[in-house]
Image (tube, rainbow, N blue to C red):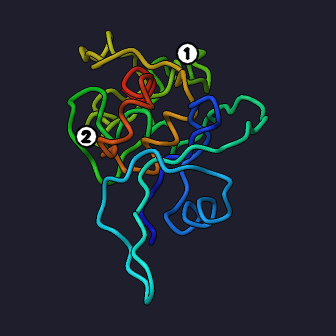
Amino acid sequence: MNEPVLLLNQNYEPLNVCRTRRAIVLLSKGKAELLENGRAPIYSVRQLYPRPSVIRMLYHVRRPRPTVRLSRREVFVRDRYRCQYCAEMTIEPTVDHVVPRRTGGRRRWENLVTACRRCNLRKAGRTPREAGMRLLRQPRRPKSAIAHLVWHVAGGSVDPTWQPYLPQLESAAG
């Protein structure tokens, strides 16, 4: 009952990721409809319920556009916990300033990357060029907060039934 379920607005725009229990409540109250059922059913004493994977609200939910706040954790999620210098997946990542703070580097999406401890120590207080290192890709602000949220909640493996509803996922999270 704790699997993630993609929640879409009436216009099919991703709203959020909720848990199966919440999705079933929305479905049973007639506030949402089932779009994708990609999992084993839920058994109750009297009935068999489809386990939702994607649901859509039957009315439009107005909300401000979400933004991704800059934090260590969100930098790690954006970079998928992969060192941006050696491409190693790391359990204990560090945040590296591409342009060091001592030379005027700011705390911005475009200047922060995930780095393993070894690469961060090797780079020290220099720019990647001065240290003879290359970035895998230029850091940037995530384009879509929803795609970023989906990637974060799904833990890096997005349910295949979600793909048609998240065309921006790869460009935002990758």
- Quarter the C terminus occupies: top left
- Quarter the N terminus occupies: bottom left
Vertical placement of residue 125 versus 47, above or below:
above
Location of mark 1 (residue) = 103
Task: Identify the residue at horizontal 55%, vertical 26% (top origin).
Answer: 144
User: Which tag is nearer the camera, tag 2 or tag 1?
Assistant: 2
Quarter holding residue 28: bottom right
Q: Secondary structure at mark 1?
A: helix
Tell me which numbered mark, 2 or 1, is placed earlier along the sequence.
1
Question: Which residue is more in the foreground, 78 or 103?
Answer: 78
Task: Identify the residue at horizontal 63%, vertical 37% (top origin).
Answer: 9
Location of mark 2 (residue) = 118
**Mark 1: few, some, or many residues within 10 Å (few <14, many ≥20)?**
few
Question: Which residue is more in the foreground, 163 or 51?
Answer: 51
**Residue 108 located left or right of residue 40:** right
Quarter holding residue 101: top right
Amino acid bearing label 2:
Arg
Percent x, y for residue 159?
32, 46
Q: Which mark identifies residue 125?
A: none
Task: Identify the residue at horizontal 56%, vertical 31% (top origin).
Answer: 12
Q: CA distance from mark 2 to mark 1?
A: 22 Å
Question: Which residue is more in the foreground, 125 or 37?
Answer: 37
The residue furthest bottom is 45
Task: Identify the residue at horizontal 39%, vertical 75% (top origin).
Answer: 48
Percent x, y for residue 27?
59, 59
Q: Secondary structure at mark 2?
A: helix
Amino acid bearing label 1:
Thr
Percent x, y for residue 85?
26, 26
**Residue 135 located left or right of residue 68:** left
